[in-house]
Image (tube, coloured by chain):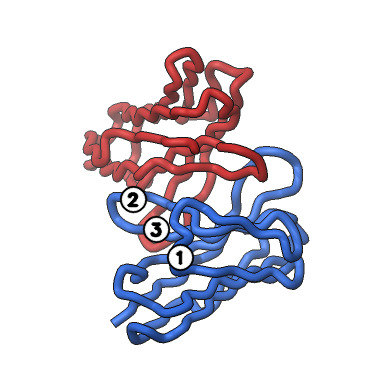
Chain colours: A red, B blue
């Protein structure tokens, strides 16, 4: 099955700085890579996703890059704000039936 | 938010008792999932369903069973609860088109004492 590794597990940045979270995956057949944000006590919610036919995708201050050859993908948040503080999960699909495997999560703290 | 609700939201139960968590959706989606969330482990798939009466195991299925007799309901049963099953449980649904966003329920915090 798919194995997704995510790092760092915790990340502190000053407000306005950039944050980068990196993930690797094992299944070369994976073709869908979503990122979820989970605020304290809330449910995970999708913030951005990328498919294997695209190398980069941006949505305002958030961008995701994918390197299929190296089997890694990254989340980039620019101009961080206190409301970006949350746990971020990367994921990759595996097998059929739309299953995804999640990374262990990165707790991002943005210091005002 | 997608129409997905979990019940109960909180539960405390004793070791050895059976427990059933319910996930209800109003989206008529085919795919439903149960995850558990634990510190240091992220979200791990317990069981999933790809249609009425069609279910399969995820990576941490031991000690859990599921049932789906109607499109809208996906039940997770802990057959004999253990302290290691203390966790936050999330149900999720995905639209029928391939590989798209998963919508999560609010979560159920289960404590086994």
Q: Which of pointers 1 and 3 lies earlier in the amino acid sequence?
A: 3
Kindly state the secondary structure of the residue where label 3 is placed: strand
Kindly state the secondary structure of the residue where label 1 is placed: strand
Say which of B16 and A94 sits in front. Answer: B16
The Cα atoms of the two marked residues, 2 and 1, are separated by: 13 Å
Name the subunit of mark 1.
B
Relative image position of residue B87 (x, y in whole percent): 36, 67
> Which residue in the structure is indicated by mark 1?
B89
Q: Quadrant of the C terminus of chain A?
A: top left
The Cα atoms of the two marked residues, 1 and 3, are separated by: 6 Å
Most distant residue in the front direction: B62
Residue shown at 31%/68% (left/top)?
B84
Badge 1 and badge 3 both on one subunit? yes
What number is the disc on residue B41? 2
Residue shown at 70%/54% (left/top)?
B50
Residues at circles 2 and 3 in contact by the CB criterion of under 8 Å: yes
Badge 2 and badge 3 both on one subunit? yes
Residues at circles 1 and 3 in contact by the CB criterion of under 8 Å: yes
> Crowding at label 2, few (<14), some or many (≥20) Cα neighbours within 10 Å?
few
Relative image position of residue B17 (x, y in whole percent): 41, 86
> Crowding at label 3, few (<14), some or many (≥20) Cα neighbours within 10 Å?
some
The Cα atoms of the two marked residues, 2 and 3, are separated by: 7 Å
Badge 2 and badge 1 both on one subunit? yes
Looking at the image, residue A20 lies above or below residue B57: above
Name the subunit of mark 2.
B
Residues at circles 2 and 1 in contact by the CB criterion of under 8 Å: no
Residue shown at 64%/56% (left/top)?
B93
> Which residue in the structure is indicated by mark 3?
B37
Name the subunit of mark 3.
B
Question: In the picture provided, is B31 more to the left or to the right than B64?
Answer: right
Looking at the image, residue A10 lies above or below residue B51: above
Say which of B9 and A30 sits in front. Answer: A30
């Amino acid at each position: 099955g798919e194995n997704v590794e995510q790092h760092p597990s915790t990340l502190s940045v000053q407000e306005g700085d950039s944050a980068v979270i990196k993930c690797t995956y094992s299944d070369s057949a994976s073709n869908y890579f979503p990122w979820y944000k989970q605020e304290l006590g809330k449910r995970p919610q999708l913030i951005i996703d990328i498919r294997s036919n695209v190398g980069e995708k941006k949505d305002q201050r958030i961008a995701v890059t994918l390197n299929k050859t190296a089997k890694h993908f990254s989340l980039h948040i620019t101009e961080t704000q206190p409301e970006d503080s949350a746990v971020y999960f990367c994921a990759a699909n595996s097998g059929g039936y739309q299953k995804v495997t999640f990374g262990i999560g990165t707790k991002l703290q943005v210091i005002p | 938010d997608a129409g997905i609700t979990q019940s109960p939201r909180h539960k405390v139960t004793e070791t050895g008792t059976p427990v059933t968590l319910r996930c209800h959706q109003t989206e008529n989606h085919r795919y439903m999932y149960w995850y558990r969330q634990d510190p240091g482990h992220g979200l791990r798939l317990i069981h999933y369903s790809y249609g009425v009466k069609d279910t399969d195991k995820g990576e941490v299925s031991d000690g859990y069973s599921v049932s789906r007799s109607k499109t809208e309901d996906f039940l997770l049963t802990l057959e004999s609860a253990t302290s290691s099953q203390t966790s936050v449980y999330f149900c999720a649904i995905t639209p029928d088109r391939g590989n798209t966003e998963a919508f999560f329920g609010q979560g159920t915090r289960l404590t086994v004492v």
